[in-house]
Image (cartoon, helix red, strand yellow):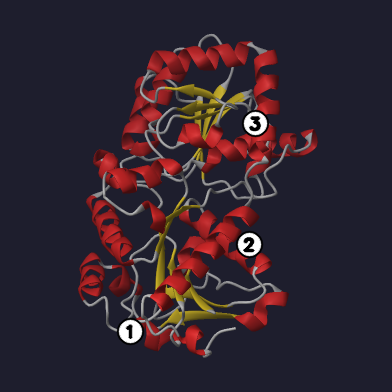
Amino acid sequence: MKILFYAPLETFHQPTGSGVYISNLLRSLLEIDQRNRYIVWHGCMVKTPPHLRPFCPPAKSQKRVTVKISRLPTRLFHHPVVRSFLWWVGDLPLADLLFGTPQVFFSPFYPFLPHRWGALVLTVFDLTPLTLPHCHLPTTQHVAKLTLLWAKRAKRILTFSEAVKEQLVRWLRFSPDGILVTPLAPTEHFNPRPLDEIERVRFKYRLLAPYILFVGTIEPRKNLTTLVKAFAALAKEFPHLLVLVGARGWMSESVFAEIEEQGLKGKVIHLGYVPSEDLPALVSGAEVFVYPSLGEGFGLPPLEAMACGTPVICSSAPALPEVVGDAAILVPPTDVEAWTSEMKRLLADGNLRETLKQMGLLHSRNFSWSKTARLTLSAFEQAAREACVGGQKATWARGKGGE
């Protein structure tokens, strides 16, 4: 079977969110699947920027993996009007001709190219552009709606949590039989780091005081103004810093304005994007990890913190309780007093921190990228079989083009 895996090249550069998903899923699929052929499509660009490197398959997979870049302008493919047009001509065999009629077209988060044969498998990260529209740009909301239109054509939809699956079924009338939940996982390098490595990273980022840590893009959905207000109420009692790790995203100005208003300059530290090689030690060195998000499709950072042995305080918004289970303290996302109270309680109680550390380490072991890849590969196989049974001219059913 031939599988087209859409992996936009830019998501491999300083990966967060979708980039973490794409890179880890692709690597894990190639580790567990020794039978099928893959086309890794990096999207459309006339000239590859020098700082972006195409995916290099593992040596044992190179004969089964082809990496392609389409020589079209990137902006043309990503333009909302063009994507809308592609929806309307969705049954043209454009992708079939470009890629030699794959049996599965996999898009990890975007609407796709029109195609006639084969089966579309599409990932829906979350529905927060619809449930929390004030947290997203209009272009993001448009792409989300267009993605859901493409999802109506998909043979299988992947999502990361039962919470999002329930939203798709209950609110948008998708069939539950066509949706597979494929939970995410921490990578192997998220584990408790040795003290010398923690000290090296703390020195590198000039974190000379104990600290509370948040990791994620600085944008409205992460609800950091609530966190800053809650931290302000304990900053005079505790010596801790609040460290924010993550790039500045859209509509992030209010967070930094709140820091100024609360007089927390020097107590709230924004490190920006931190390279993956430093992040596990930075997480391991935190006394508490906090994640006050208003809503997630999964919420990987709290699970990564647990894997590093760091106690977690987490929002109770979907789908986070499903991810952290009973191994974290759950707090209503916008309750400032509750966030202050729980942070104080955890900072003051070493026994509670140790209990949550052990519970988190144990809980995080229930997740792995190998499991995610196996569930995803199962979805590919189901989708291809259904496309064939449904009468599509899948070439693998006629003994052509696949293995």
Residue 8 percent coordinates (x, y): 45, 67
Residue in the foreground of this view, choosing between 164 and 388: 388
Q: Earlier in the sequence, mark 3 or mark 1?
A: 1
Describe the element under mark 2 as helix, strand or loop.
helix
| Residue located beneath label 1 in the image | 94
| Residue located beneath label 2 in the image | 28
Residue 79 percent coordinates (x, y): 26, 68
For residue 314, say whether it is visible: yes
| Residue located beneath label 3 in the image | 360
Residue 40 percent coordinates (x, y): 52, 75
User: Marks 1 and 2, how far apart in space?
Assistant: 29 Å
Q: Which quarter of the picture shows residue 128? A: top left
Q: Residues within 10 Å of mark 2 (few under 14, many from 20)?
A: some
Residue in the foreground of this view, choosing between 235 and 358: 358
User: Marks 3 and 2, how far apart in space?
Assistant: 24 Å
Q: Is residue 15 above or below residue 390?
A: above
Q: Earlier in the sequence, mark 3 or mark 2?
A: 2
Q: Which quarter of the picture shows residue 110? A: bottom left
Residue at 36% across / 80% down in the picture? Answer: 391
Describe the element under mark 1 as helix, strand or loop.
helix
Disc 2 residue type (three-letter): Ser
Disc 3 residue type (three-letter): Gly
Q: Is residue 332 above or below residue 149?
A: above
Residue at 62% across / 54% down in the picture? Answer: 371
Q: Which quarter of the picture shows residue 196? A: top right
The quarter of the rendered structure image containing the C terminus is bottom right
The quarter of the rendered structure image containing the N terminus is bottom right
Residue 241 percent coordinates (x, y): 55, 24
For residue 13, say whether it is visible: no
User: Marks 3 and 1, how far apart in space?
Assistant: 47 Å
Q: Residue furthest top?
A: 237
Disc 1 residue type (three-letter): Leu
